[in-house]
Image (spheres, rainbow, N blue to C red):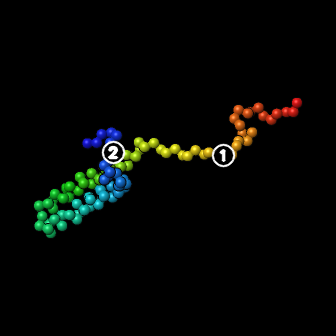
Amino acid sequence: MSGPGRRLPASLAWMPWWLSVILATASYLALKYLAPPLAVSAGLGHLAGMLPQGAPIAAMGFLLLAAIQLYDGDDVPPEEPPEDHDDQPEDEDDRPGDDAGPTRPA
């Protein structure tokens, strides 16, 4: 079992989280509705009753993977925007600390 701070294997990390949700839906529908008739026609009638019961378990596995993928990137600090380096000199009026106002001739 992976503890805190451990990452997904590279073979699973490439998938976006929403693809895992689509795979969960597809696996559920395939095991619940498509696989039993195929098992009966292939001569594996004893598996036809077990396949629909395994559909929620397979879907839960993909949904847990989707949750891990969705929240795995939350611990990455956001990138800082590049600093704006202005090569032009500052105006004399824009200098900090010069709040005395206009000078009067003496």
For disc 1, the neighbor class at 10 Å (few under 14, some 14 to 19, many from 20) is few
Instruction: Identify residue for label 1.
Output: 87
Residue furthest bottom as drawn:
41
- At 15% across and 62% down in the image, what residue appears? 48
Q: Nearer the viewer, residue 94 or 28?
A: 94
Q: Is residue 88 above or below residue 38?
A: above
Mark 1–mark 2 Cα distance, whole angstroms, equals 43 Å
Residue furthest right as drawn:
106
Q: Nearer the viewer, residue 71 or 15?
A: 15
Q: Does residue 9 appear to the left or right of 105 in the view shown? A: left
- At 37% across and 46% down in the image, what residue appears? 72
Residue 83 drawn at (x, y percent): 58, 44
- At 54% across and 46% down in the image, what residue appears? 81
Q: Does residue 75 appear to the left or right of 92 in the view shown? A: left
For disc 2, the neighbor class at 10 Å (few under 14, some 14 to 19, many from 20) is some
Q: Does residue 86 appear to the left or right of 41 in the view shown? A: right
- Residue 21 visible within the image: no
Amino acid type of the residue that numbered disc 1 sits on in the rendered structure: Asp
Amino acid type of the residue that numbered disc 2 sits on in the rendered structure: Arg
Q: Earlier in the sequence, mark 1 or mark 2?
A: 2
Mark 1 secondary-structure assignment: loop
Residue 41 drawn at (x, y percent): 15, 69
Residue 30 drawn at (x, y percent): 25, 62
Instruction: Identify residue for label 2.
Output: 7
**Labels 1 and 2 touching (C-beta < 8 A):** no
